[in-house]
Image (tube, grey):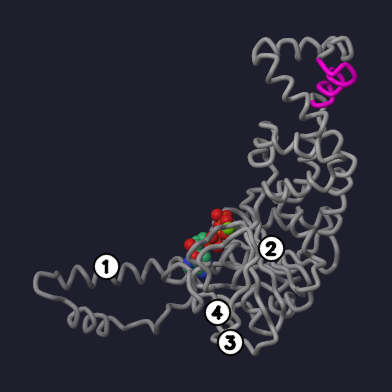
Amino acid sequence: MAQGSIRDVVDRHRVVVCVGSGGVGKTTMTAAIALDAAVRGRRVLCLTIDPAKRLANSLGLRAMTTEMQSIDPALLASVGGDGRGSLAVMMLDTKRTFDDLVTKYASSPERRDRILGNKLYQYISTSLAGTQEYMAMEKLYAVRDDERFDLVCLDTPPTSNALDFLHAPERLVGALDSQAMRWFVQAWEGAGKFSFGLVGRGAAFVLKGLSKFTGAGFLEQVAHFVTDLNDLFGGFRERARRVYESLRSRDVAFVIVTSPDPMAVTEALFFDEQLSAAGMNRQALVVNRVHGELPMPEPSESRLREIVAGRTRDGVDAAALLGKMSRALDDFRTAAVQDAAQVERLGGSIGGEVPLARVPAFQADVHDLDALRRVATHLS
Ligand SMILES: Nc1ncnc2c1ncn2[C@@H]1O[C@H](COP(=O)(O)OP(=O)(O)OP(=O)(O)O)[C@@H](O)[C@H]1O
Ligand SMILES: [Mg+2]
């Protein structure tokens, strides 16, 4: 049905970005793709946004940190690595990425320190909607040309709407460079204190109201901050544009991850439209946690009886246990039929153009090396 495999897609690109709605397996898939590529000889950087402690442990790390950490080559060798490839992981740190940007674009050390120390900045750099998405891409932009790596895998925050992710640069700059912000600058600049005569009557009214409400000290903080940040906009706006553009480059492949849940599939289809409309390079689909074949040959009724008889201790109702097992099997079969229908639906819409991988629902979470390797076998 589809052209090539996800592995082929990974091999043809320099950057792989896993996107999808919440909880579908983006972080897991990013790690599995990164590990697989490293085992097959590429020098990989995996950027995650998730502290995923057990995942870190399975890669021989105590924790994911915002410092770059290299995976022990012996560990790669233990799962088949031939020594050519390497794997480094790093957790994205939204605030620190923002701090780095401010440091880079502030016109003087004084301004830089004033921005970094401002209370509003603390809020914006951690809590303003879109900041995390933007900074994920910002980091990607910063590392994509790092010559130590030939593949960068990016995990992304859960977004219910691809637009959130794609338009984060515009939204963030828009929020920072809004009309209200400009009022502040106008009212503040020049005099070094508030001068409501400098802004329109409407704005003066709002600002005066605010100062009654919050106290002038707070407004001064805001004004300082906005003035300083304005100083960054020239650089920052241009930077945001370049970050956005770089995502459209041909060496960036987007992988849409979804579960077979009908709602998640609807979202994945919507994501796909958004990516195309934005001129982004959607290259593969992963349907994760698919109920397909049973993890073992399906036991016959008589075999089930035998199994149950062999395991029941005194006081266990064998008939009830048998009933439970049969029901679990039935549930699994029903789920398999439903999942197949959803995979079909996705395949019909977009799977014909790009590789579509089905990763089974494992019995336990994907938190060790073996499980990551098992995920990867479904990508080829
Ligand atoms: N195929 C699978 N079978 C079983 N468990 C899985 C599978 N894929 C992922 N998981 C588990 O599901 C949980 C969620 O996965 P993951 O953290 O990768 O999702 P996510 O899309 O990154 O979530 P978020 O949107 O919150 O960042 C994890 O505990 C992971 O180990
Ligand atoms: Mg995640």
Q: For mark 3, does the 10 Å Cα neighbourhood hold few (<14), some (14 to 19), or many (20 or more) residues?
A: some
Point out which mark residue 41 bears.
none
Which mark's residue is nearer the viewer, 2 or 3? 3
**Along the horizontal axis of the image, is 308 left or right of 211?**
left
**Are the residues at dot 3 and dot 1 in contact (C-beta closer than 8 Å)?**
no
Q: Position of residue 368 (x, y in %)?
A: 48, 73
Place residue 305 in its image quadrant. Answer: bottom left
Residue identifier under label 1: 324
Nearer the observer, disc 1 or disc 4?
A: 4
Is the Cβ of the residue at disc 1 closer than 8 Å to that at disc 2? Answer: no
SS under mark 2: strand
Q: CA distance from mark 4 to mark 2?
A: 18 Å
The residue type indicated by label 2 comes to: Leu
Q: Quadrant of residue 84?
A: bottom right
Among numbered discs 3 and 1, the one appearing first in the sequence? 3
- Range of residues picked out in magenta: 181-193
Determine which residue is flagged by label 4.
373
